[in-house]
Image (cartoon, rainbow, N blue to C red):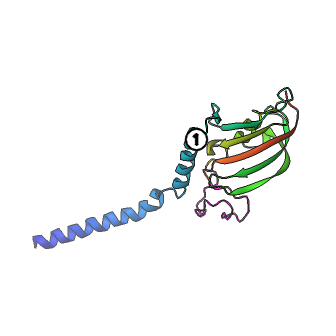
Amino acid sequence: MDSKIKVKGIKCIVYGVWCMMLLCLPSCTENKWADWKVQNELWLAQNLKNDPTVKVTASGLQYKILADPTPTDAKPSRTSYVTCDYTLTLINGNKLEGGHATFALTNVISGFAEGCCLVHNNGDIRIFIPYSLGYDEAKVTENDEYNAVGNEGTEGTQSYIPPYSTLIYDIHICSVSGSN
């Protein structure tokens, strides 16, 4: 009789643990983007080690001035409009977008605005924007599928930016208006 009680007790404990796991599992699942996030953080740390010409600002933005031929020309401020040629890539080399456009620096991600303000008109800069100065984890949703490829994202666009991505912009400032 005593062994039947022990077996029944063990079955109850196992069943209870199993039920708790089922209840906790949805809230305990690991962030499916955690590996991509770590890859991006490690890439940024390695970027500073690999290239001594890369500088970092207090906010964590990394940058490299490629050319600044007119240092007496206007330098954008956070309230400027800039016309620029740019390309955007991810750390895996996937080019997401690029072109020629005019931006109000008040309407772009903070890392892009900060980077534009580091070079004068007619200058070239490469900026490495950590996700905290870019799109952060804002794109992580319940139904988001893991896809760090960048060009075949769940949103079905060529410019899908996975959450936690480091954004690498090559920018040529063509003109600046409204600078202080």
User: How packed is label 1: few (under 14 Cα within 10 Å), some, or many (20 or more)?
Assistant: few
Query: Residue 48, how many percent across, how many down?
Result: 58, 38
Query: Residue 130, how many percent across, how many down?
Result: 62, 43
In this picture, residue 24 sits left or right of residue 134: left
Looking at the image, residue 29 lies above or below residue 87: below
Quick check: is 157 in the magenta stretch? yes
Looking at the image, residue 149 lies above or below residue 81: below
Query: Residue 160, how many percent across, how many down?
Result: 70, 58
Q: Quadrant of residue 46?
A: top right
Q: Magenta stretch?
A: 138-162
Q: In terms of secondary structure, what is the magenta stretch mainly?
A: loop
Q: Residue furthest left?
A: 1
In this picture, residue 135 sits left or right of residue 13: right
Question: Which quadrant of the rendered structure holds the C terminus?
Answer: top right
Residue at 81% x, 42% y is 172
Q: What element carries label 1?
A: helix
Depth check: give the residue in front, 154 or 53.
Answer: 53
Question: Which quadrant of the rendered structure holds the N terminus?
Answer: bottom left
Depth check: give the residue in front, 170 or 111.
Answer: 170
Q: In which quarter of the image is residue 25?
A: bottom left
The residue pinned by badge 1 equals 50
Q: What residue type is labelled 1?
A: Asn
Quick check: is 26 in the magenta stretch? no
Query: Residue 9, how many percent across, how many down?
Result: 21, 67
In this picture, residue 36 sits left or right of residue 150: left
Looking at the image, residue 42 lies above or below residue 120: below
Tally the marks: 1
In this picture, residue 14 sits left or right of residue 56: left
Depth check: give the residue in front, 105 or 88.
Answer: 88
